[in-house]
Image (tube, rainbow, N blue to C red):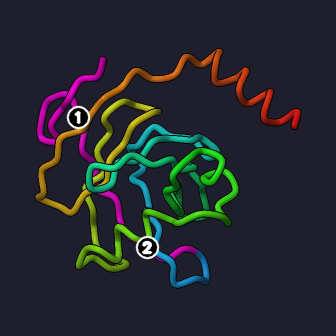
């Protein structure tokens, strides 16, 4: 069973994030606000225009950022394969590096959304995976 929550509802915390360039590349990335309680290396789900993707939280000298959003966690881990849905999303908007985006915290540490400022969206909130099951899956993946 899943719940639906609106981006402007009391259950969602909205921060300002910034579109930036990833390192020396021209590829856009999402610079996260200092208030976001995330850690480098964490994997989160990121909703872009209603579609849910997987993203890894990275860090550089300026703080936390998301360099990409991918169809599954394996692709998010490698960051070299698959289509970067964050890049596609940015190209589909009129936003560019240096501009702000709304960064919604739907389920802390698990589900987030990025949207053009002022646009409203509704998120589908599914149950977060059990940490112990996620740890087992990680162990199995690492053993391969």
Q: Residue 41: give its label.
A: none
- Residue 111 in percent (x, y) is at 39, 37
Which one is nearer the viewer's eye here, 51 or 47? 51
Q: Was residue 111 drawn as part of the magenta stretch in this picture?
A: no
Q: Residue 5 lies in what quarter of the image?
A: top left
- Quadrant in the picture for the C terminus: top right
Which residue lies at the image location 56% right of the left edge and 50% below the top edge?
57
- Residue 124 in percent (x, y) is at 27, 33
Provide the residue span drawn in magenta.
1-22
The residue pinned by badge 1 equals: 12
- Residue 81 in percent (x, y) is at 66, 64
Which residue lies at the image location 64% right of the left edge and 17% below the top edge?
133
- Relative to 59, does residue 6 appear above or below in the rendering? above
Q: What is the C-alpha distance between the residues marked 2 and 1?
A: 24 Å
Which one is nearer the viewer's eye here, 17 or 53? 53
The residue pinned by badge 2 equals: 20
Which residue lies at the image location 56% right of the left edge and 41% below the top edge?
43
Q: Was residue 16 drawn as part of the magenta stretch in this picture?
A: yes
Tell me if 91 is positioned left or right of 10 in this view: right
Which residue lies at the image location 58% right of the left edge and 82% below the top edge?
25
- What secondary structure is marked by label 2? strand
- Residue 37 in percent (x, y) is at 45, 37
Tell me if 121 is positioned left or right of 115 in this view: left
């Amino acid at each position: 069973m899943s719940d639906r929550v609106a981006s402007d509802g009391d259950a969602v915390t909205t921060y300002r994030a910034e579109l930036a360039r990833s390192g020396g590349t021209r590829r856009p990335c999402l610079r996260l606000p200092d208030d976001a309680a995330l850690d480098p290396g964490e994997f989160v789900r990121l909703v872009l225009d209603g579609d849910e993707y997987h993203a890894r939280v990275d860090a550089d000298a300026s703080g936390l950022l998301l360099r990409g959003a991918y169809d599954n966690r394996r692709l998010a881990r490698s960051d070299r394969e698959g289509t970067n849905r964050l890049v596609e999303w940015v190209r589909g908007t009129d936003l560019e590096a240096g501009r702000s985006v709304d960064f919604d915290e739907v389920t802390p540490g698990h589900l987030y959304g990025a949207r053009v400022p002022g646009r409203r969206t509704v998120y589908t909130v599914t149950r977060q995976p059990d940490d112990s099951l996620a740890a087992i899956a990680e162990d199995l993946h690492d053993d391969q």
